[in-house]
Amino acid sequence: MTTRFATYYAYRTPHGPVTIRARENGIANVAFGDAEMEGERRPSELTNRAATELLEYFAGKRRGFDLPLAPEGSDFQRAVWGGVLCIPYGETLTASQLARAIGRPGSHRATGAAVRRNPLAVLVPDHRVVDAHGRPPGADAASRLHGALLELERRHRDANA
């Protein structure tokens, strides 16, 4: 999909660089690393706002985000990402539980695939979707980051309880 206007910029965070891409109607992508994305590489008011909110989240000062989101995906993917947004801070669901929560109980594999394709890391908190054993799926750097984000949320949730 081609957009008329998009900007992206990489910001420093405690978890390494995060690249944020904004379109006219909202944040379209958030990815860990200094990534090349479609659009003009420059900060915008919206990417700066998203970076500020992410830094507040990483510092334990924010539990949710007040940003317009504009992810590109199928209707099913957007339904899954909407379900992920409903998982409370510091809590988790499995893909099967999430599939049931969005009214698609037989689609746990497709739900898991949609979670893995989430273009809005942290803003749509896919790190809250875990495997059947309660662990972040996979054994790569993304899995370790998801575990660190869950630990951050649990620590700040329990400190404020």
Image: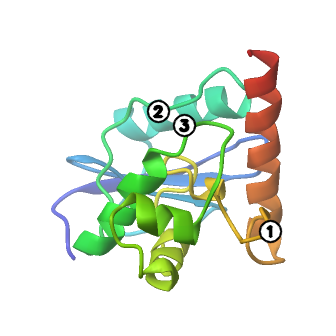
Q: Quadrant of residue 129?
A: bottom right
The type of residue carrying mark 2 is: Phe
Q: Residues within 10 Å of mark 2 (few under 14, many from 20)?
A: some
Q: Secondary structure at mark 3?
A: helix
Number of on-image labels: 3
Q: Position of residue 58 (x, y in %)?
A: 71, 34
70 to the left or right of 89: left
| Camera-nearest label, 3 or 1 | 1
- Front residue of 93/127: it is 93
Location of the N terminus (image quadrant):
bottom left
Labels 1 and 2: the sequence-earlier one = 2
Labels 3 and 1: the sequence-earlier one = 3
Which residue is located at x 80 percent, y 68 percent? 133
156 to the left or right of 101: right
Which residue is located at x 45 percent, y 30 percent? 49
Which residue is located at x 56 percent, y 50 percent? 125
Distance between mark 3 and mark 1 Cα atoms? 32 Å
Q: Which residue lies most toward the top here? A: 160
| Camera-nearest label, 2 or 3 | 2
Q: Quadrant of residue 46?
A: top left
The type of residue carrying mark 3 is: Ala
- Front residue of 156/61: it is 156
Q: Secondary structure at mark 2?
A: loop
Tags 3 and 1 in contact by the CB under 8 Å rule? no
Q: Which residue is mark 2?
A: 65
Q: Which mark is residue 51?
A: 3
The type of residue carrying mark 1 is: His
- Front residue of 103/64: it is 103
Q: Which residue is mark 1?
A: 133
Distance between mark 1 and mark 2 Cα atoms? 28 Å
105 to the left or right of 132: left
